[in-house]
Amino acid sequence: MTGAASGLGLEFSHLLARDSFDLILVDIDGNKLGEAKEILEAKYGVNVDILHHDLSTPQVATKIYAAVKGREIEVLINNAGFGLSGFFSKTNWQAEEAMIQLHVLTLTHLTKLILKDMLEKKSGSIMNVSSLAAFQPGPLMAVYYATKAYILSFSEALANEVKGTGVTITVFCPGVTKTGFQGKAAQLSGSKESRINFRTISPQAVALYGYIAMQAGKPVAIQGFQNKLTALLPRFVTRAFAVSMVRRIQEKLRE
Ligand SMILES: NC(=O)c1ccc[n+]([C@@H]2O[C@H](COP(=O)([O-])OP(=O)(O)OC[C@H]3O[C@@H](n4cnc5c(N)ncnc54)[C@H](OP(=O)(O)O)[C@@H]3O)[C@@H](O)[C@H]2O)c1
């Protein structure tokens, strides 16, 4: 489980531990990882190992794989991610480079390393956490939307490739969820956190939906009618209209 110390990742960890899985939690925040380990071990009686890594550094997937080698990985959840907004010409390149490394390269590499072992055992589940942002380009959050579109496309293709092998790939596309995500995105973007009151769903409910979809081996998981409609909408309007709608939403968020 990556990005396991807070938000959706922590909720997935509770769900896995509740189902008696021993856990390997990876996150950039060592203190929160330690707290999560204590709580999960005490509450569910499972073993929790923690790996303190910045997943936006090159070759980190190799290091993680070396650290877990010999362990039987039944479930991989690539969940870690963060947002950044602003005009691409003005946003911080270091943050965007880290985002591409985290959302694209590390996720892809970890999937490759662990998928091979799962295919040999003919069992396992991988869930990659994308976003509703994956379904159309996102002006003022261009790199975030593009990397989430990559996760969707990559995971759907893999889900097809592994059909009938005993291994499943699920891509989970949450809508706005009440976690630390928005605060961190605002902080990285040098903007105020949006005061728009979204109909946000709790991370517990969102994680549970994704978890059940992963267990069912669903290729794509989108929670709720409204989110499904949002994902489908770009198919019924012109691409230019969909892009301009996102632009308007992003501008509102930044007011
Ligand atoms: N919340 C939403 O509205 C929403 C909507 C759609 C999709 N998502 C996706 O859901 C996933 C989980 O997000 P969340 O809402 O749970 O956000 P969150 O509350 O910020 O949790 C993300 C976790 O990942 C960790 N992380 C971030 N960058 C990392 C790195 N380079 N290396 C290791 N760990 C790192 C964070 O640590 P720090 O806190 O120390 O940075 C945090 O513990 C993300 O992929 C996000 O894109 C979220």
Image: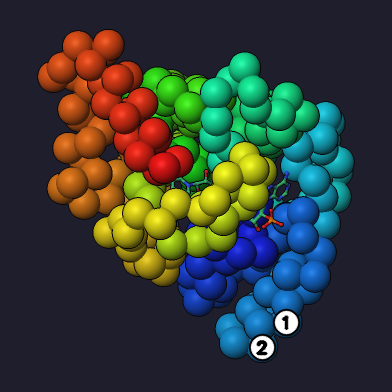
**Distance from the alpha carbon under mark 2 to that under mark 1:** 6 Å
- Residue toward you, 106 or 165: 106
The residue nearer to you, when weighing 82 against 85, is: 85
**Which quadrant holds the N terminus?**
bottom right
The amino acid type found where label 1 is placed reads Glu
In this picture, is 72 found above or below 139? below
Name the residue nearer the viewer: 19 or 57: 57
**Residue at image coords 27%, 59%:** 199
- Seen at 65% across and 68% down, the residue is 22
Instruction: Indicate the position of residue 107 as horizontal and vertical percent values.
Output: 64, 34
For residue 253, side relative to residue 229 (left or right): right
Return the residue found at the far bottom. 42
The answer to whether residue 217 is left or right of residue 63 is left
Q: Is residue 193 left or right of residue 206?
A: right
Looking at the image, residue 41 lies above or below residue 15: below
- Residue 185 - label: none
Marks 2 and 1 close (CB-CB < 8 Å): yes
Label 2 lies in ligand 1 vicinity (Cβ under 8 Å): no
Residue 42 numbered tag: 2
Residue 231 appears in the figure: yes
Question: 15 or 9: which is nearer to us?
Answer: 9
Quarter placement of the C terminus: top left
Q: Quadrant of residue 160?
A: top left
Disc 1 target residue: 38
Residue at the spot 32% in from the left edge and 19% down from the top edge: 243
Q: Provide residue 3's location: percent of width, then percent of height.
A: 64, 54
> Residue 217 at what x, y percent from top left?
36, 45
Residue in the image at 23% along x and 36% along y: 230
